[in-house]
Image: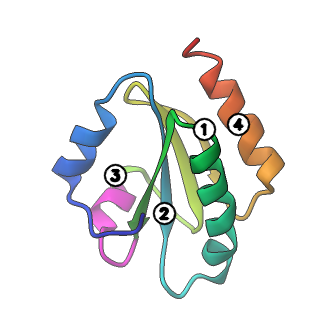
Amino acid sequence: MGEHLKEKELVSLLSREGKVFILKFWADWCSPCKRLEPILKELESTYTDVEVIGINIDQDSSIANKYEVKSIPTLIFILNKEVKRVLVGVNSKEVLENALRSILSEVK
């Protein structure tokens, strides 16, 4: 998570069907972003069909602009190339897990 990512690479990743991608928009200087990190790592290890993709807004501003990210942290949940949910700010593990379960129920 958090490597420099080109938009073409992101499009390629998101084309994988049946997997929930969480685009995590963050920056090095963002304290709330850092508080979300352990929760996201735990969710990613718990749910095998979930992948978190970190997008540093200072390095990948074109991707942030494409998804109209106005503040961070922003989490965008994508399933089958479709945005399913957007969460802005720091949310609890319970809120994130409920969002994930709701989206994953569409897969099964």
Q: Earlier in the sequence, mark 3 or mark 2?
A: 2
Give the left or right position of residue 80, taking residue 13 as reference: right
Quote the CA–CA distance across marks 1 and 2: 20 Å
Marks 4/2 in contact by CB < 8 Å: the verdict is no
- Dot 1 or dot 4: first in sequence order is 1
Nearer to us of marks 3 and 2 is: 2
Quadrant, the C terminus: top right
The numbered disc on residue 25 is: 2
Secondary structure type for disc 2: strand
Residue 17 versus residue 27 in the image, above or below? above
Q: Tally the numbered discs.
A: 4
Q: CA distance from mark 3 to mark 1?
A: 27 Å
Amino acid type shown at disc 2: Phe
Q: Are marks 3 and 1 in contact (CB under 8 Å)?
A: no
Q: Residue furthest top?
A: 108
| Label annotation for residue 99 | 4
